[in-house]
Image (cartoon, helix red, strand yellow):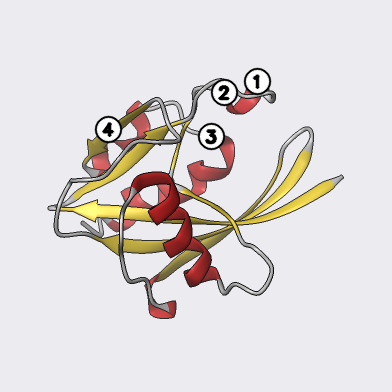
């Protein structure tokens, strides 16, 4: 089974968290699901470098992410692949970004996160955010 290692950003502005909706996918089980933005770690990149690159490429969002911004790692097995996702807290000073890779987005307070249909791998992050009320 294919194994992927990815990074994800928990983008926070004024107490709200950015939730991004995927488009149609070959894997129906992740089509149109909400997720935290991010992507694959490329050879030679650190996790934080990969996340900063992904946010720039996908959203024109330039942020500084440090190792100490780490939130949690999720290991999840989908029908076609295994995923290890490292998430980082990413406070921003503006809601301005470009939505290049997703079909929709929402800014929600932690208590509202469960109202969305999340990708299974992202759900443990949602649960922890709701319990911790970080924002």
The answer for how far apart the CA atoms under marks 4 and 1 are is 22 Å
Quarter of the image holding residue 45?
bottom right
Judged from the image, the secondary structure of the residue bearing numbered disc 4 is: strand
Q: Is mark 1 in CB contact (under 8 Å) with mark 3?
A: no
Q: Is residue 43 above or below residue 39?
A: below
Name the residue beneath numbered marker 1: 28
Looking at the image, do the residues carrying marks 3 and 2 touch, with CB atoms under 8 Å apart? no
Asked whether disc 2 touches disc 1, contact meaning CB atoms under 8 Å apart, the reply is yes
Residue 119, how many percent across, how many down? 53, 34
Q: In the rendered image, which residue does mark 2 sit on?
A: 31
* Residue furthest right as drawn: 1
Say whether marks 4 and 3 touch (CB < 8 Å): no
Label 1 crowd bin: few (<14), some (14–19), many (20+), radius 10 Å: few
The numbered mark, 2 or 4, whose residue comes first in the sequence reads 2
Q: Nearer the viewer, mark 1 or mark 3?
A: 1
Q: Earlier in the sequence, mark 1 or mark 3?
A: 1
User: Of discs 3 and 2, which sits in the foreground?
Assistant: 2
First in sequence: mark 4 vs mark 3: 4
Spatial CA span between label 1 and label 3: 11 Å
* Residue that badge 3 annotates: 119
- The residue positioned 62% from the left and 24% from the top of the image is 25
Alpha carbon separation for disc pair 2 and 4: 17 Å
Tell me which residue sits at (43%, 31%) in the image: 102
Query: Going by the image, does 46 lie left or right of 91?
Result: right
Query: In 3D space, how far apart are the residues under numbered discs 4 and 3 (Cα atoms)?
Result: 15 Å
Q: Which residue is mark 4?
A: 106
Mark 4, other Cα within 10 Å: few <14 / some 14–19 / many ≥20: some
Residue plotted at (34% across, 36% down): 99
Picture quarter with the C terminus: bottom left
């Amino acid at each position: 089974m294919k194994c992927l290692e990815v990074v994800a950003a928990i983008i926070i502005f004024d107490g709200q968290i950015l939730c991004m909706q995927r488009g149609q996918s070959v894997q129906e089980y992740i089509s149109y699901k909400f997720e935290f933005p991010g992507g694959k770690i490329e050879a030679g990149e650190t996790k934080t470098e990969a996340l900063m690159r992904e946010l720039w490429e996908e959203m024109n969002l330039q942020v500084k992410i440090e190792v100490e911004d780490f939130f949690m790692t999720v290991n999840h097995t989908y029908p076609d692949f295994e995923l290890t996702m490292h998430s980082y807290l990413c406070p921003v000073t503006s809601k301005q970004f470009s939505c290049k890779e997703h079909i929709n987005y929402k800014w929600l307070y932690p208590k509202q996160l469960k109202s969305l249909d999340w990708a299974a791998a992202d759900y443990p992050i949602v649960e922890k955010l709701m319990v911790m009320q970080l924002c």
